[in-house]
Image (cartoon, grey):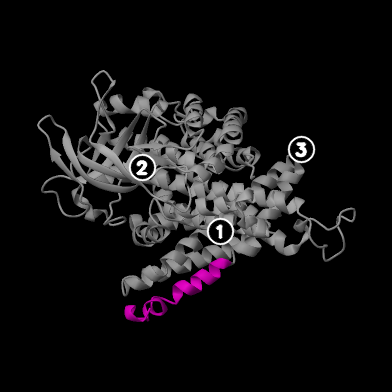
Amino acid sequence: MPSYTAPTKDMQFVLHDLLKVGEADIRGYDEMDRDTTQAILEEAAKLAENVLQPLNAVGDEQGCKLENGVVRTPDGFREAYAQLRDGGWLSLDADPEYGGQGMPYVMETAAGEIFASANISMAIYKGLTHGAVSALSVHGSDAQKAMYLPRMIEGTWSGTMNLTEPQCGTDLGLIRTKAVPNDDGSYAITGQKIWISGGEQDLTENIIHLVLAKLPGAPDSTKGISLFVVPKFLVNEDGSLGDRNAVSCGGLEKKMGIHGNATCVMNYDGAKGWLVGEPNKGMRAMFTMMNEARLAVAVQGLALGEVAYQNALGFALDRVQGRAATGAEAPERPADPIIVHPDVRRNLMDQKAFVEGARAFSLWGATLLDRGHRAGDREAEDMISLLIPVLKGFLTDKGFETTVNAQQTLGGSGFTREWGLEQFVRDARIAMIYEGTNGIQSLDLVGRKLPMNGGKTVMAFFEMVKGFIKENEGDATLSQGFLDPLKAASKDLQTAAMYFMAEGMKNPNNALAGSYDFMTLFGHVCMGLMWARMAKAAQAALDAGASDRDFYEAKIATGRYYMARQLPATATHLARIQSGAEPVMALDAANF
């Protein structure tokens, strides 16, 4: 059976040595000293390791069951969810006015990684409620906030987001769900939604659905979409639960992975709902939660890569097969552990370099969100908006790749259920699809984010990288394998951006055909920047006399590996971008 140990030491390194959260001029960050963050992470680790992780295989084997309109979650899930609720993990960064703890979002992100590594199916229930709370917090009326937020934040009620319909996914302008006004100010919601995570379950007393629908006469496009709050059970004025609403689960999807999470077909048959925000402004409300939701999915890619890597490493240290090419390294054993073999080392280094770099990238992204929301920093908001499709696309692509690499480390054992790696592979695959497929992320990056603010935001990113390189030109550690690769990769990224600017207007397909490569190229540059910054932080700790020299020296060595073995991929992606649309579009559809 697989195991999991929360990487709290590495998280502390990122939070304090790299990001220096306790020194940041962001509201609430002055309270995040090392002792405080360590206490939070250790408590999350206990719950994840002792309660959530043991249920991961249970959820995969049993799945969810729909019985007479009620979804039964796997054995132990209700009790585990109650521990998440009672421990305050559903309210970590929520507004204290409604019962939240008011912690910065960066701590929610760190804890979220731990929970997702331990049990991704359980983490999704928590994550959907978090997104619904975020949307209601910004766009709900005072009465709606007072009615729904306290119970959602404490975890006795949960939340969902209902977007997709059988005939449309990304193109939400095609939705058919209707909202017809009632005499009492509510609306009758009628339609069908699919792929609704947690749409029905037995974990909470009530489920608060946020539903996209169209009012009569609304424009037949995304400009005609409104958002409605539709509770499973109607709520009386005193907050008690009333009658069952006309919303039901019509079926459960049979999926490749995340079996412990109920993915529902939801039927709305004149269900009572109430408008959230302004009419025809539902997309704006949806995008309020989008940056957080997509960052959370990016973290899922990292989280599954982390737990898969841990189990691959354990196997490689224990499994004996063959002898090291340079001579026996464990002569007392019948063979050497497979970690002595260079190809196994390569595979493990790919995994290690990804998960540690991705952790730094995602937590940096969370601090940008905090800076935007808590400090009113518009430039930080713009920067995270630029980076969100890169975070979501790159980290889930590479996270899935990391689970496959970890599975490969185990050889035939990785293909069997007993060792658990095949579940990580299956579970990780969905993160590349939901919250906008990674192809859509790349189109968003090239089509919307690059030209944002007249290109000023992407130029600010380039200047950030240039500034880091320039200010560290004399750094002895960074001069050895960090600055030159980062400079070359950044140049590739700038060249690609210039290509899009020059060619995009002449032939949009030239930009669209290269968008996925651009997203991946951008991701590598961000990871390279993170590794250079981490190497600098690690060397500073060594210079200050850190007691755990092995940890910091390993950090620098892993960074050098990424710069030497992974970052040069930017040149390949640039060459593919510059080939334009012709090789992609040359074949007629009939000839595929």
Return the residue at label 1: 401
Q: Specify the quadrant that holds the N terminus.
A: top right
Q: Specify the quadrant that holds the C terminus.
A: bottom left
Return the residue at label 3: 547
Query: On screen, 592 above or below 568?
Result: below
**Magenta-colored span:** 569-592
Q: Residue 283's x, y, as percent?
A: 27, 47
Residue type, label 2: Met
Q: In which quadrant of the rendered view does residue 509 lie?
A: bottom left
Label the magenta part by its dominant secondary structure. Answer: helix
Judge depth for marks 2 and 3 and give the one in front: 2
Q: Residue 241's x, y, as percent?
A: 28, 23
The CA distance from mark 1 to mark 3 is 34 Å
Return the residue at label 2: 289
Q: Would residue 510 be found to the left or right of residue 364 on screen?
A: left
The residue positioned 28% from the left and 54% from the top of the image is 166
Mark 2 and mark 3 lie on one chain; the one further toward the N terminus is 2
